[in-house]
Amino acid sequence: MNIRTLALLGALALSSSALGCKEEPTRWDTAASSTVARSADAPPVKEAGSFNKFFPADGAEGMKRVYTQEKTGFAEAKLQKDGKDVAVLSISDASGDAEALKKFEGATDKIQGYPLVTVGLYQRADFCLPCHQLPPRNAVAGRPLLDTYREWLEGPYMPRGVQCQHCHMPSREHTVLGVHDPNTFRQGIALDASAHRHGAAVTAVATITNIGAGHYLPTTPTPAAWLSIALVDARGQPIAGATARHRIGRDVWFDGEWHERADTRIAPGASFAFARAWTGGRTADATAARIVVEVHPDDYYERFYAEQLAGPLAPAQRALYEQALARATGSHYVAEQRDVPIAR
């Protein structure tokens, strides 16, 4: 089924907004910004209130219309049914955006006098399906090893119209951003942490939330994220014996057929809380809890290469595996780190 885009007021683009993508000063700003470079002879930007008449009427088809954003050149509304969001609609004034205007030049269809165009397949999530979704017959512990499209389909972003390309191909760039790009991963998470001292014991809690990925975090069995907590002293040095870490990912192995050890991924909008407590030793010297989120983009392959290197190999093969392992381990990065003072 085609996704249709309507041009309003001769140059208003009706589109789905990329909600859920956490905004930071990165290339995402270019994709998420509602401001476009306007030509010198472009008409004044429309006030958001003038767009409201183009949204479906409140109560239409039993749905409640709720306006959620209004700013110069942009308006957004939600459609709700039985108290649940079923769609998010946005209208942007693109009258000074030459690229947006060009998109409607060849339009032959119209709705209420406004040009209508069909969005190309490459701008839709189903374009990604052939490479990012395996059939049910390939399920391991009830889920295919690649289940990304279904995760998106059943998650909160599909009803909002947020496509894979909103985050992975911002500004229509063909550099597909993923877990190997630190900024991409950082856009998808929110980290909250606290630490308290209760008598001789210190308790630390770190909560990581999937706020920006439209699929599970991480989605495939290849990467892993490690959430760690370590108590540190006043000099910032770790206290021996006061560390813990948790693997976030889908842990699988192959011995002729696939098996799953654990699936600790985080669903869209969901959170995972990691709590640990220590007492004794140098716990009394602890002044903060160091929380680290470290990403290993090629975690599965690291283990595979190490297993191969543990066995007999011809010199040429060993050299190739060593190179592959070095490249995989070299892709590690720290997505977030903070020292949380211990409260009393």
Image: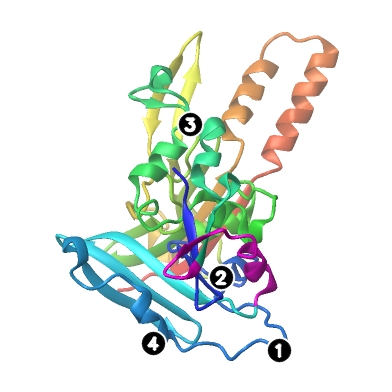
- SS for callout 1: loop
Discs 2/1, front: 1
Write down the residue under mark 4: 49
Q: Position of residue 94 (x, y in %)?
A: 58, 76
Q: Give the residue type that dot 3 points to.
A: Gln
Write down the residue under mark 3: 133
Task: Please tell me which residue lies in front, 266 or 307.
Answer: 266
Q: Earlier in the sequence, mark 3 or mark 2?
A: 2
Tell me the distance, in whole angstroms, between the alpha carbons under discs 2 and 1.
Answer: 31 Å
Discs 1/3, front: 1
x 51%, y 8%: residue: 256
Q: Quadrant of the C terminus?
A: bottom left
Tag 4–tag 1 contact (CB < 8 Å): no
Task: Please tell me which residue lies in front, 321 or 163.
Answer: 163
Tell me the distance, in whole angstroms, between the alpha carbons under discs 3 and 4.
Answer: 41 Å
Discs 4/1, front: 1
Tell me the distance, in whole angstroms, between the alpha carbons under discs 4 and 2.
Answer: 28 Å
Q: Is residue 130 magenta?
A: no
Q: Residues within 10 Å of mark 2 (few under 14, many from 20)?
A: few
Q: Is residue 100 magenta?
A: yes
x 42%, y 56%: residue: 161
Write down the residue under mark 2: 24
- SS for callout 3: loop
Q: Residues within 10 Å of mark 4 (few under 14, many from 20)?
A: few
The stretch in magenta equals 97-114
Q: Which mark is residue 41?
A: 1
Q: Position of residue 299 (x, y in %)?
A: 58, 34
- SS for callout 2: loop
Above or below for 326 versus 120 = above
